[in-house]
Image (cartoon, rainbow, N blue to C red):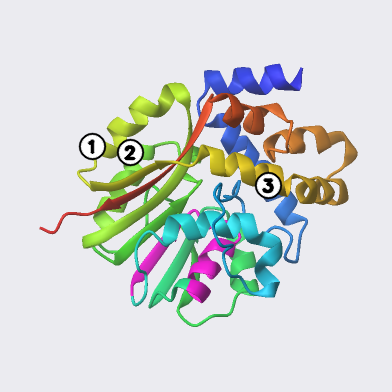
Amino acid sequence: MLRRSVGFVNRAVPGLGYFASRRWFEYISSRDSGRDMLFMNYGFAPLADDAPLNLRSEDAEHRYFIQLYHHVASAIDLRGQDVLEVGCGRGGGTAYVARYLQPRSILGVDLAANAIAFCNSHYRLDGLRFERGDAQDLPFPDASFDALLNVESSICYPDVPRFFSEVVRLLRPGGHFLYADIRNREELAGWAEQLAATGLELLEEENITPNVLRALELDSERKQALIDRQVPLLLRRTFKEFAGLQGSDFFYGAFANGEKVYKRFLFRRPVD
């Protein structure tokens, strides 16, 4: 029954299912005052025998989430750059970029007040700041940033083209848009049209669905334990669907059968 219900909702209102999943994760995170929920993404795992990403010991438990951020954000050299992350959630990815990729500054923005409050109490790093803000109406002057990062967030926005117009406005000439997100298969053509309409130069486009699926498999046991520990029994089945546990249908199954696609992009704002 749950599979049929969420499947119908997702087909009827594209993006609503993922919006609901973020609300579920925000509920979990509101119950977590520590390090269990620093990230709200589905993760990334290499498929080849690549050397593992070298992480500090305190970051190892979040490896798959961090690997997604690294795969998206390391598409360019961020050293010495002013970076904005829109949709930072509880700040794990923003802090990773600050600590490992050495931008001059990075500002994380999210609409959720509780997430920003957590970030401001949890992180203390030079050059790292967090503010509350709406992705569709960001309170910054034109051409404020060298790079704008957006990971698995825009699918929740009511007006995605308006967000894209904010990206263009805020990037300096020659600046980069580092972007990754999910769409249903039937939404891909419209998504491509929205991105083309920005006038940004597409440098890279990659289907990373297999990598995300592999990360879900490798992290399934840890997520299962987290849900069992933090979520009331009545809600656990729903949480397991939205968390993408191996064998679930709504996200894991949809990635596996091609109904949902996860893509990574690198764009550049043309030099005027």
Q: Which residue is mark 2?
A: 161
Residue 197: mark: 1
Q: Amino acid at mark 3?
A: Phe
Marks 2 and 3, the one that precedes in the sequence: 3
> Which mark is nearer the camera, 2 or 1?
1
Task: Answer above or below: position of 271 versus 103.
Answer: above
Image point (63%, 36%), residue name: 20
Image point (39%, 37%), residue name: 159
Q: Amino acid at mark 2?
A: Pro
User: Few, some or many C-alpha atoms within 10 Å of disc 1 (few <14, some 14-19, many ≥20)?
Assistant: few
User: Few, some or many C-alpha atoms within 10 Å of disc 3 (few <14, some 14-19, many ≥20)?
Assistant: some
* Res 140 seen here: no
Q: Quadrant of the N terminus?
A: top right
- Separation of residues labelled 3 and 1 (CA atoms): 32 Å
* Res 13 seen here: yes
Q: Are marks 2 and 1 in contact (CB under 8 Å)?
A: yes
Task: Answer above or below: position of 250 versus 211.
Answer: above
- Separation of residues labelled 2 and 3 (CA atoms): 25 Å
In this view of the protein, which residue sits in the foreground, 30 or 214? 214
Q: Is residue 148 left or right of residue 93?
A: left
Q: Which residue is mark 3?
A: 25
Residue 156, percent from left and from top: 51, 39
Residue 25, percent from left and from top: 68, 47
Residue 213, percent from left and from top: 61, 39
Marks 2 and 1, the one that precedes in the sequence: 2
The question of residue 92 being in magenta is answered with yes
Q: Quadrant of the C terminus?
A: bottom left
